[in-house]
Amino acid sequence: MNLNIDAVKAQTFDAIVIGSGISGGWASKELTEKGLKVLMLDKGKQLEHVSGYENAMKNPWDTMYNGRLTVAQKESHPKLARDYPYNENTEKYWMNDSDSMYQEEKRFDWYRPDIVGGKSIMWGRQSYRLSDIDFEANLKEGIAVDWPIRYKDIAPWYSYVEKFAGISGEKLGLPQLPDSDFLPAMDMYCVEKEVKKKIAENFPGRIMTIGRVANLSEAQKAQTGVGRSGCQYRNKCSLGCPYGAYFSTQSATLPAAMKTGRLTVRPDSVVKEIMYDENKNRATGVRVIDTNTLEVIEFYAKIVFVNGSTLGSTSVLLNSTSNRFPNGMGNDSGELGHNLMDHHFKIGASGEWEGGKDNYYLGRRANGIYVPRYRNIGNDKRDYVRGFGYQGGGSRAGWNQGSGEKAFGADMKESLTKPGPWRMGLSGFGECLPYHENRMYLHKTEKDKWGLPIAVFDAEFKENEAKMRIDMQNDAQEMLEKAGMKNVRSYDNKSYPGMAIHEMGTARMGRDPKTSVLNGNNQLHSVPNVFVTDGAAMTSASCVNPSLTYMALTARAADFAVKEMKKRNI
Amino acid sequence: MNRRELIQRVTVMLGGVMAAPLMTGAMGQVLNTEPGLAVDDSQEKLLAEIADIIIPATSTPGAKEAGAHNFIVRVVRDCYTKAEQKKFYDGLAKLNDDSKSKYGKGFVELTLPQKNEMIEDATVYNKDFFREMKNLTITGYFTSEIGATQALAYDPIPGKFDGCTTLEKGQKAWAL
């Protein structure tokens, strides 16, 4: 009897955080710093900061295939091998296709990490604030439902997370892209300076700025205090940074949470479901399957933060059924799993610059440039709604510059050892509307290796996105041509949902419990001690990279949750 | 913490790990689901000689000394499908056969001008093989230790970024 009580005590926390990526790390940091005893779970394996980044310091000659995948890897990863993020050097960070079973009614590229830290290790680090143009769009256009928050609600939380995470960028004062609390902006390549100037001259209302990125251009106390240091300009971020120079769970939120002495991290723990007490109308904890032993373990807590990534979080909620919630926890509206979004991209243009022959560069900037949205802003009106931004950047080719079909020998070798032409590329990232019919759901019979129902995807980009892509392609070409680039080629390499790894929606925030899953504090409308603060919460997608918003929403919701606990409301 | 201390700290922390990739490379494990086509010493030698014509020694060592052929054998074995492997090695055999019909000797035994002649021929009569071999040789060479650090400028930890410097006379392209 005593043993049981002890066991229950050992498995009881103030809060459980499901997932350890960008938002899970933030939840754990905020909740532990506010005095809560927290258990952070991740289905992935442990990844130690620095020593776990096995490929981070490799020379090119230390790799087997210079990044290529083997035939065996392609065969065992038929889905992941469809695109670039899975390669020789990042292989261990991603979940095997055989473990990540899912079905595609329509093609969906689902990138699932298999490590503590989640995608905070491999993310692109581009960090932008949403604006009121984003928060008001659904209401103004009568699309989906209204966001329950506005910019003023989240602005102080953007500042709060930015000061800790460290976002480098340039202040512009644009209404559609509010400035962050920036670290110094990174420099531009010669070719980018040229294109920036020409865009400003030729296209009123369009601006090219340096990317806003979660890399430390200059480490501040908030960052050195958790052991981070400045960017070394190696541009090897996705391998894991031994310098802690970009924001990740391991470099930033995890050490902060560990410092409190109140965090327990449990890797190899896939959450089966959130347990629910119908009498109290509260979640009581989670049921976890140990991925190594397959043992089922229960953990208990007063609040649960669901941060398992958009589709992971929604899968957990959908699988958490009870008498009260036969269709998934918090799913009174029937919207759980619906309104799945991603950015559409892989479209743009690139060209060569004949100038700058006498210029070169030093260091490899782990960042690109950004052209903030200019379509459907102010007086601009298109035959579609919303808009897109461009990412991209300049480079000066090296040994991979190409040498003509028949060249070989000493002359070719000599030419490849000298800097080649400057190039410039612009690649659009477009907003996708929240369509109710774009969804993921759990398969009725098919189970994965842990006995959990597998996800099925039924989502596609539609007419509004297709119309937008015409501008995305043409505008890129036009801007580069006007900027004096030569051999400008535009492309549309086709984009499928999931590929941008900006999956959003499926448990949206809203004002009305009848049409949304979460309220304005990321709290389940119907279960007040469960919070979802990752991409699942997004009511619309904006066209900017979303992770910074997850950070801000998480810190804000954690603050609310702890205040509510103190008031004994939850 | 200055840059030197930072690098030292990271190197110490990664100390045990730095040796691992080299070990993997040395063990040369076969990762293909079925074993790749067997490559014998004479084929390897042939690849090394061809690579050395594509990227010869100049003021810096060539592809052979850099060991580009080891990379080529490894990539073809593990990253090419069986059909792609066969096509590649058929192309290699054809080059050697063409050399025998033209000069009565295998490629390896030819004089340097004759070798250059044969590769010149291959750009027309053995096009696919030449293109594949050239691409592999270029990657294998410029990502080798010799290629990256001697033929190119290698700076693994720049520590700073300047997007628009003056190109110095004779400045080499960056390896990374």
Image: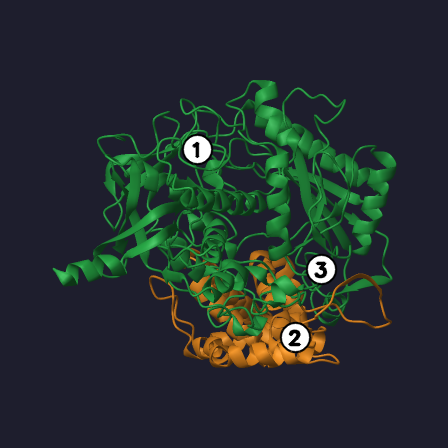
Chain colours: A green, B orange
Q: Which mark is residue A518?
A: 1
Label annotation for residue B160? none
Q: CA distance from mark 3 to mark 2?
A: 17 Å
Q: Amino acid at mark 3?
A: Ser
Residue A501's x, y, as percent? 51, 44
Query: What amino acid type should be assigned to the residue bearing mark 1?
Result: Leu
Quadrant containing the C terminus of chain A in the rendered view: top left
| Marks 3 and 1 belong to one chain | yes
Which sits earlier in the primary sequence, circle 3 or circle 1?
A: 3
Q: Quadrant of residue A187?
A: bottom right
- Tell me, for residue B147, which label it has, or none: 2
Q: Secondary structure at mark 1?
A: loop
Question: Disc 3 designates what residue?
Answer: A403
Q: Circle 3 sits in a helix, a strand or a loop, which is it?
A: loop
B114, B49: nearer the viewer? B49
Crowd class of label 3 (few under 14; some 14 to 19; many from 20; radius 10 Å) = some
- Give left or right: position of B55 versus B172: left
Residue B63, picture quadrant: bottom right
Which chain is mark 1 on? A
Can you see residue A83?
yes
Q: Residue at x 55, y 34 (%)?
A: A541
Residue A29 or A172: which is nearer the viewer? A29
